[in-house]
Amino acid sequence: MRRKIFANTLIAIIAVLLTLILLEVLVRLGGQTDADGRFTLLNFTVEAQELPVNELRGQVENYIANKDFAVVIYDEWMGWTFRPDSVRQGGGFTINSAGFRSRRDFDPSPPADTLRIAVFGDSFTAGDDVNDDEVWSYLLERELNEAGIRTEVLNFGVGAYGMGQAYLRWQHLGKRFSPDIVIFGLQPENLKRNVNVFRQLLHRSGPPFSKPRFALIDDELQLLNVPTLPPEQLIDVFANFSDHPLAPFEFYYQSRFRAARWWSASRLLSLIFEALRQDDDDPGIYTAGSEGGDLGKAIVDAFAQDVLEDGAEYVVLHLPLQSHLIRYFSNLPRPRPVYDFLLEHSREAYHYIPFEEHLQPIHVDDEYWSATKHYGPRIHAVLAEVVADEIAACIESGSCRTPRFDNLSSIAITNPSLEN
């Protein structure tokens, strides 16, 4: 009897092993492996343990060959920025001579009778996928002028920026224009960008730049990778990454080793692991008490302190993603986003505008969003109205600090219909 049980068990084990081997072979035959060792089958990709040097080389060589014409260019302080006096999106996105989105230039000193607002953030602030006359910053200026408040709005948003880059853009460019109100377009999902140094490790499509990275060392913000490594140096860095001094500060390099398992050589088991994961991000990046969470809060606070010390009002504007709105308007029980602590802190500490509270369930529909999941023109229009109402109310009530003006009458338009 024991021999029979042993024989049956052995047969079952052999059958399972043969099945797994057959499935492994079928998976390998059905998938594709690129030059950097990434394996893809259907919609799932298994990242290689080595860095994508070959893919990076192609991106860097392409950038160098076209850098005299590129609109997004290398910057030693922010990693990348816009080329002054250029256009993108088929001419619908204009960059002025100072390097920020506008169809006109501005004097560094604001007019004595005009409220100057500056906005900072990523692509949702910059207004990717909408035209110059559709972006919320342009519409905000128009809304406030029509409301009788003489205003100009300067848009310093840049696509793919992390919170730290937005803060640095204020320090190195925005501050020169002496705004009265600074609006930070907060994307909590960008907490993951704060712990990233090399853009290719977060998003394979690039751009082929490194970025500055703040780190909390002994509870103090310290800035790393400034001046940022130029594209020409990145290939050598990737080829010997483990020895580079920035390697310990690159979350998406460390995560490769944390994600490695004893079974990582198996394409089948690796694909099963990818399929079972809820998403590509480590949720620990977002939580209070994590490196990413604490770093994000410290950057928001440092940004605020710098703006307030410069004599401007600081406003935090939460710009939700479509996925956030879907959760927000769901009638089903839903977990609180793990980055809620940052929103609550911003609400308690600063002038805070929760944009999601001004939207409707219909705004989650794809027709309100671009193909790349940025706001479409109709959401930009709503956003401009919401922010204009908030700014007008805080100026009239005196809750916004605007030291240049004793009262509203100094920036009031007597006849708004006569203003251009």
Image: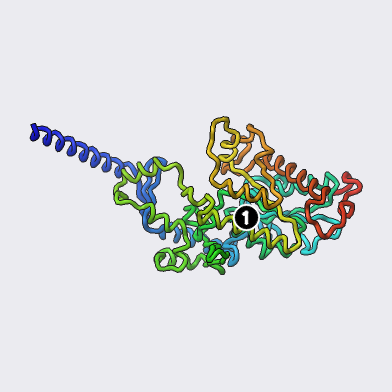
**What residue appears at the point 50 percent right and 54 percent down from the top-left corner?**
290
Asked whether 387 or 420 is in front, the reply is 387
Residue 363 shows in this picture: yes
Image position, residue 219 (x, y; %): 55, 63
Residue at 77% from the left image edge and 57% from the top image edge: 180
The answer to which image quadrant residue 193 occupies is bottom right
Which part of the image, by quadrant, shows the N terminus? top left
Q: Position of residue 139 (x, y in %)?
A: 74, 46
Viewed as shown, does residue 18 lie left or right of 382?
Answer: left
Amino acid type of the residue that numbered disc 1 sits on in the rendered structure:
Val
- On screen, residue 326 above or below 210: above
- Left or right placement of residue 28 versus residue 158 in this view: left
**Residue at left 73%, top 63%?**
310
Is residue 61 visible from the viewing direction of this image? no
Dot 1: what SS?
A: loop
Query: Residue at left 9%, top 32%?
Result: 4
Closer to us: 394 or 162: 394
Q: Nearer the viewer, residue 129 or 308?
A: 308
Residue identified by numbered label 1? 158
Q: Residue furthest right?
A: 414
Q: Is residue 359 above or below residue 57?
A: above
Q: Is residue 145 above or below residue 72?
A: above
Q: Is residue 73 left or right of residue 278?
A: right
Question: Quick one: 221 or 405, which is closer to the camera?
Answer: 221
